[in-house]
């Protein structure tokens, strides 16, 4: 092994470790949201998610970054990105109240496939036959999960599907902004836009103080979202996307584990088949996208 290879390997392993830990944090976040949803409004969970991120990022990043953290060439796009992600989080948190965590996570993991479709239709990108087959396979997996009689209740199946389309547009916007914007700056503005938006409606939904256990779980939601996203930034800063992409889908495994441990949910044969098909097609399509260096690969994070 050459000296250069010896230097690269530890960096790649560190990036993979950061990424797997990040998606584990997101799985904990989703499981906790579903659990506390029985006692508190989704708006309260969204507020804790973004208020925690806004305060934490400001406390840790503003002192060393100062004006660099606030500097942006596209303030309107920063605001739009924050609005989109806040709406996505609200849809995600509502969806989790009606479906198993593992199934929900698998469906939102079709976002890279939807990005492929939107890029072909609206950005005139050329899409190979293999990529079209992967898109079709991912959507077929989704149909297996939301089929009539499946674990997802009727109209509720439209929520994660709407979320996926919104997230695809969010990811396309992010890809355009990433060419000129600092990732930490984007993280900063996303947190504060979400915190401000949710604060505007919070008094309408938070009328009773939660007990100690519920408050601790709400804080956990904010902590897992903030730490997970920061670890994701560290992962992609150390390792190329094509190496990390397959490991993004480990979030589905963590989500299924959380659903089993907390709610006792075990996917049925059709549901498990749909999840497996989405993971196979989504991971392959994302890996190809990363290799071609088209749009950046991001994990759909509520």
Image (tube, grey):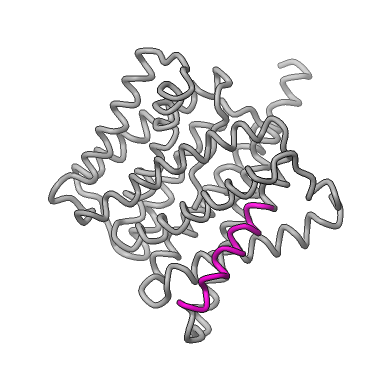
In this picture, residue 95 sits left or right of residue 53 = left
Along the viewing direction, whichever of 104 and 178 lies nearer the viewer: 178
Q: Which portion, as a residue range, is magenta? A: 189-204
In this picture, residue 177 sits left or right of residue 59 = left
Q: Residue at x 33, y 59 (%)?
A: 260
Q: Find the residue positioned furthest to the front.
A: 76
Q: Dividing the picture into quarters, in which one does residue 47 lie?
A: bottom right
Q: Residue at x 36, y 43 (%)?
A: 106
Q: Dividing the picture into quarters, in which one does residue 112 lie?
A: top left
* 187 in relation to 34, above or below: above
Whole-percent x and y of residue 174?
59, 37
Number of marks in picture: 0
Q: Residue at x 57, y 59 (%)?
A: 224
Whole-percent x and y of residue 254?
43, 50
Whole-percent x and y of residue 59?
77, 62
In this picture, residue 203 sits left or right of residue 189 = left
Along the viewing direction, whichever of 36 and 258 lies nearer the viewer: 36
Whether 219 is among the magenta residues is: no
In this picture, residue 39 sits left or right of residue 272 = right
* 243 in relation to 124, above or below: below
Q: Report the magenta stretch's main SS.
A: helix
Whole-percent x and y of residue 186?
67, 46
* 246 in relation to 30, above or below: above
Q: Find the residue positioned furthest to the left.
A: 149
Q: Residue at x 58, y 47 (%)?
A: 80
The N terminus lies in quadrant: top right
């Amino acid at each position: 092994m050459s000296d250069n290879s010896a230097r690269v390997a530890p960096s790649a392993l560190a990036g993979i470790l950061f990424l797997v830990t990040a998606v584990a944090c997101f799985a904990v976040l989703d499981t906790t949201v579903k659990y506390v949803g029985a006692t508190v409004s989704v708006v309260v969970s969204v507020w804790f998610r973004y208020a925690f991120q806004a305060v934490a990022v400001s406390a840790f990043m503003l002192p060393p970054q100062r004006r660099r953290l606030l500097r942006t060439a596209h303030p309107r796009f920063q605001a739009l990105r924050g609005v989109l992600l806040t709406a996505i989080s609200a849809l995600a948190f509502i969806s989790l109240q009606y479906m198993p965590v593992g199934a929900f996570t698998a469906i939102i993991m079709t976002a890279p496939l939807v990005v492929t479709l939107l890029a072909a239709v609206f950005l005139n990108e050329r899409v190979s036959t293999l990529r079209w087959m992967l898109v079709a396979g991912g959507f077929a997996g989704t149909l297996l999960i939301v089929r009539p009689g499946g674990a997802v209740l009727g109209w509720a199946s439209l929520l994660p599907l709407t979320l996926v389309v919104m997230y695809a547009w969010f990811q396309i916007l992010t890809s355009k902004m990433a060419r000129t914007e600092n990732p930490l700056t984007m993280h900063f503005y996303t947190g504060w836009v979400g915190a401000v938006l949710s604060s505007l409606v919070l008094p309408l939904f938070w009328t009773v103080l939660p007990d100690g256990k519920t408050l601790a779980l709400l804080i956990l939601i904010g902590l897992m979202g903030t730490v997970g996203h920061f670890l994701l930034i560290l992962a992609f800063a150390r390792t190329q996307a094509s190496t990390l992409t397959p490991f993004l889908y480990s979030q589905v495994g963590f989500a299924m584990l959380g659903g089993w441990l907390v709610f006792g949910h075990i996917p049925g044969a059709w549901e498990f088949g749909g999840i497996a098909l989405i993971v196979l097609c989504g991971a392959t399509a994302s890996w190809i996208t990363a290799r071609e260096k088209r749009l950046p690969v991001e994990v759909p994070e509520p």
